[in-house]
């Protein structure tokens, strides 16, 4: 695509990267067919090609930017368009640049500022989020029914096995997951322990920075990355093989730490090193060999593969392969490439679109009458569970039948 970047963006890191991305797009429009928001509205500007064009116009100085912001806000950052694009256009990077410029250059309404500040003050901080969740559960009788339905039921906090193996991995325990679904990390630690790998929690590590990044708050995202690097580095230097994320939504951000801190002389090297040593949980389990084929006992499971896993990390089909090897019967799920509408804070900020996507996703998942739905990301799990007719859990729990949900279905 021919571009004429405005002089104020020329030779800036954002301008140079955006120009390269814009030039790689040939405007063919193949990506629109697999874009969930375009499928909902039919509006070209709610699809990737339209959004690319809006960022281009902004960088060329042709618009005020509010139009760009409106349609970028409606984008899920699901990256389905990147999977479809035959030219390898890095849409998500371009969208992040557009969002960041919008934060830096456009006026935001007081309501927008308040809403983002409130989310940023609570969601990435497990203790604060846990306290809010606990309070909401105590007061649930007073809450409106719609809000009550969103509260995840409490999960038991099973202990982690003591570290005992020479092979060790550092855990990204996460923020929301740590508070809302603690069973996931405990199950991951037990399953990996059984595979001869100790999963090591690291006090001091926290949110991966995804929430800040997707809201365009770069400085905050970088601070989260630096904090995690400081927390993980001693364990990696002491022999841990890498960092494992059990929430797939964190993986794509962790893999971008090198780019995120490229201009920070104190952190750039360690950030790039860590980015190359990040593994999603399913990669680790799949590499460890086939699981016990008797665990699943033929029970019917519908897998929702999160966008972060299939489009962000390119690991579609890995969880499905593990569960089939473990003896579960996987149901066929139509439109598996389409987002469920969770998408980080999207379900809070764009409830109407997110609600329609959730309804469609649950119809596809529940049509073949599974005993259970599993996924790989806490956001999808909580979002789908609010209206699902069957339990929605993290897939790792199915390999942990002694403690997890595997024994309950
Ligand atoms: S992003 Fe890719 S698929 Fe979409 S219009 Fe550009 S080149 Fe075509
Ligand atoms: S990231 Fe997802 S919602 Fe956004 S333009 Fe691409 S396909 Fe559409």
Image: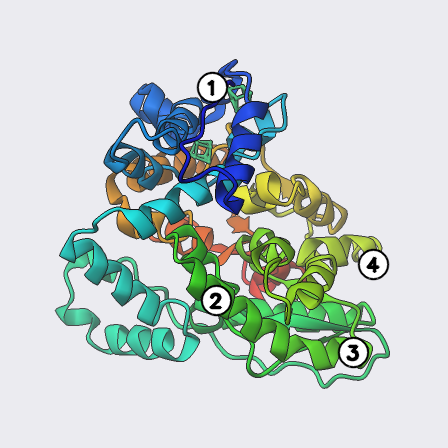
Q: How far apart are marks 2 and 1 (CA)?
A: 32 Å
Q: How far apart are marks 1 and 3 (CA)?
A: 46 Å
| Of callouts 4 and 3, the N-terminal one | 3
Q: Where is residue 185 in the image (x, y as percent from the top left)?
A: 59, 70
Name the secondary structure under disc 2. helix
Find out if the beta carbon at label 2 lies less than 8 Å from the nearest ligand 2 atom.
Answer: no
Q: Which of 17 and 72 is in front in this view?
A: 17
Name the secondary structure under disc 3. helix
| Of callouts 2 and 4, the N-terminal one | 2
The residue identified by callout 2 is 177
- Residue 391: in sight, yes or no? no
Q: Position of residue 273 (x, y in %)?
A: 74, 63
The residue identified by callout 1 is 33
| Of callouts 2 and 1, the N-terminal one | 1
Q: Which colour scheme is used?
A: rainbow
The residue identified by callout 4 is 288
The residue identified by callout 3 is 237
Find out if the beta carbon at label 4 lies less than 8 Å from the nearest ligand 2 atom.
Answer: no
């Amino acid at each position: 695509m021919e571009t004429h970047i405005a002089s104020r963006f020329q030779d800036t890191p954002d301008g140079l990267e955006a120009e390269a991305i814009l030039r790689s797009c040939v405007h063919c429009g193949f990506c629109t067919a697999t874009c969930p928001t375009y499928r909902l509205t039919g509006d070209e500007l709610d699809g990737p090609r339209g959004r690319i064009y809006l960022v281009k116009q902004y960088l060329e100085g042709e618009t005020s930017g509010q139009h760009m912001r409106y349609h970028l806000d409606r984008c899920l950052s699901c990256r389905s368009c990147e999977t479809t694009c035959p030219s390898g256009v890095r849409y998500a990077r371009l969208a992040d640049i557009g969002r960041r410029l919008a934060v830096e250059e456009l006026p935001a309404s007081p309501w927008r500022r308040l809403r983002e500040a409130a989310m940023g003050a609570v969601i990435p901080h497990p203790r604060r989020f846990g306290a809010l969740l606990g309070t909401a559960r105590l007061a649930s009788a007073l809450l409106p029914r719609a809000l009550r339905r969103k509260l995840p039921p409490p999960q038991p906090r099973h202990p982690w096995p003591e570290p005992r193996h020479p092979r060790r991995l550092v855990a990204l325990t996460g923020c929301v997951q740590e508070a809302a679904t603690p069973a996931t990390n405990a199950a991951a630690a037990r399953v990996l322990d059984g595979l001869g790998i100790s999963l090591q929690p690291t006090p001091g590590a926290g949110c991966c920075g995804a929430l800040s990044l997707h809201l365009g708050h770069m400085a905050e995202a970088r601070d989260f990355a630096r904090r995690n690097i400081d927390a993980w580095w001693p364990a990696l230097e002491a022999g841990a093989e890498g960092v494992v994320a059990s929430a797939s939504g964190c993986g794509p951000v962790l893999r971008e730490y090198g780019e995120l801190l490229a201009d920070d002389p104190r952190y750039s090297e360690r950030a790039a090193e860590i980015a190359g040593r990040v593994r999603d949980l399913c990669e680790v389990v799949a590499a460890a060999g086939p699981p016990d084929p008797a665990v699943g006992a033929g029970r019917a499971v519908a897998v929702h593969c999160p966008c972060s896993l299939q489009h962000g990390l390119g690991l579609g089909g890995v969880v499905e392969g593990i569960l089939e090897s473990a003896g579960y019967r996987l149901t066929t799920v139509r439109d598996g490439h389409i987002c469920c509408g969770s998408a980080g804070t999207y379900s809070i900020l764009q409830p109407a679109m997110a609600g329609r996507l959730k309804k469609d996703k649950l119809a596809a998942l529940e049509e073949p009458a599974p005993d259970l739905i599993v996924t790989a990301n806490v956001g999808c799990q909580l979002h789908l569970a609010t209206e699902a007719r069957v339990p929605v859990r993290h897939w790792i729990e199915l390999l942990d039948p002694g403690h997890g949900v595997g024994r309950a279905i």
